[in-house]
Amino acid sequence: MNLIQDINAKRGSLSALRRDLHAHPELCFNEHRTADVVAHKLTEWGIPIHRGLGQTGVVGIVKGGTSSRAIGLRADMDALPMQELNTFAHASTYPGKMHACGHDGHTAMLLAAAQHLATHRNFDGTVYLIFQPAEEGGGGAREMIKDGLFDRFPMDAVFGLHNWPGFQAGQFAASPGPVMASSNEFKVTVHGKGGHAAMPHNALDPVPVACQLVQSFQTIISRNVKPIDASVISVTMIHAGSATNVIPNVCELQGTVRTFSMDVLDMIEQRMRMMTEHTCAASGVHADFEFNRNYPPTINSAHEAEFCRQVMAGIVGADNVQAQEPTMGAEDFSYMLLAKPGCYAFIANGDGDHRDIGHGGGPCMLHNASYDFNDDLLPLGGTYWVRLAEQWLAKATA
């Protein structure tokens, strides 16, 4: 493994920084302390900063040489609204908040790279260090873009990195094309006419209509979507009634839709809306149909994904660079990839053996209350960011 030695030598201080962030998790658009820590470190290393994009975002600017070329490196900063089960020394000190997705580690890895890049500047161009808020449901990437991220800081490509539990530490994964799904939510409120449960002929029962819709929605996946176009419709909530002998007036369905294609998403939304309207009409009831599109699919550019794989291979060897298995999880880095070419890659987090004594009894998986980031990745992730920036902005040779 070809780690940058001065980054590797700082693994103790990097771990302390990461654990400090872990102990002080902040939710979307409230990453005030985290942003202060980031801004202080960047300023300490002589890196000019800009604050306020996406409310709490921080952008650091590292220039080397004279080229106008530029690259963006992004780390997310926010935590999740979860109660941590770990009791080790760096467990969350804020009840109901936890770094259960490793954004503390992502921030620390990019800070490790920032210090090295600012010290050595072995590249020709500009590196924009993007510390983004509100990935967990707030669309912080979208908000930073709205606030002028790519207008104020023009860059040729943008890159992201996420830890991935369950794979051997020391490995990476990057692939072209869709790697994470779109995230969308729906709500169907079926309005009927309540009545006595013993006399259903005097009512218009919304419950069997809602049950029919749950089953019908699945036929969209099995009969309207191409088998090779992965997609999911999951009804995850059904709410109706308050007594066993009363037919309710209303039954409400909620759930999620995930796809890797916007065309497939358009079709699914249209079919769900039509099924709702016609099924309700056939039963003499009516419904309100709401469909909210959250994050688009995360789609890596072919050239940038291959470039990342080559950089990774130079650090850990080609055998340790895997293909990304697309996941139905979603990621708001997708907004950046809609605006710029780039690649969202994975760095393996291991199987949980790295966790300190006092970890929770659950698995070390993302969004699990027993999760913890693997500090052994900090020098590796920092090395990857540096080598990616240096090779992307390689100095021209005569």
Image: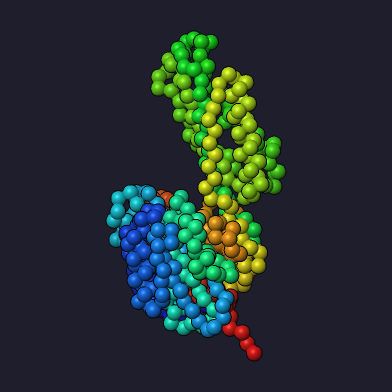
Q: In the rendered image of this protein, does residue 51 appear above or below residue 368? A: below
Taking the spot 57% from the left edge, 42% from the top edge, the residue there is: 257
Q: Nearer the viewer, residue 98 or 290?
A: 290
- x%, y% of residue 26? 35, 56
- x%, y% of residue 143? 47, 56
Taking the spot 38% from the left edge, 78% from the top edge, the residue there is: 45
Q: In the rendered image of this protein, does residue 30 appear above or below residue 72? A: above
Taking the spot 61% from the left edge, 47% from the top edge, the residue there is: 259
User: Would you identify the image quadrant in which residue 214 lies?
Assistant: top right
- The answer to whether residue 86 is left or right of residue 139 is left
Label count reads 0
Q: In the rendered image of this protein, does residue 143 appear above or below residue 387? A: above
Question: Does the image show residue 139?
Answer: yes
- The answer to whether residue 148 is left or right of residue 223 is left
- x%, y% of residue 137? 46, 50
User: Would you identify the image quadrant in which residue 102 lies?
Assistant: bottom left
Q: In the rendered image of this protein, does residue 113 appear above or below residue 160? A: below
Question: Does the image show residue 377?
Answer: no
Q: Quadrant of the C terminus?
A: bottom right
- x%, y% of residue 218? 62, 35
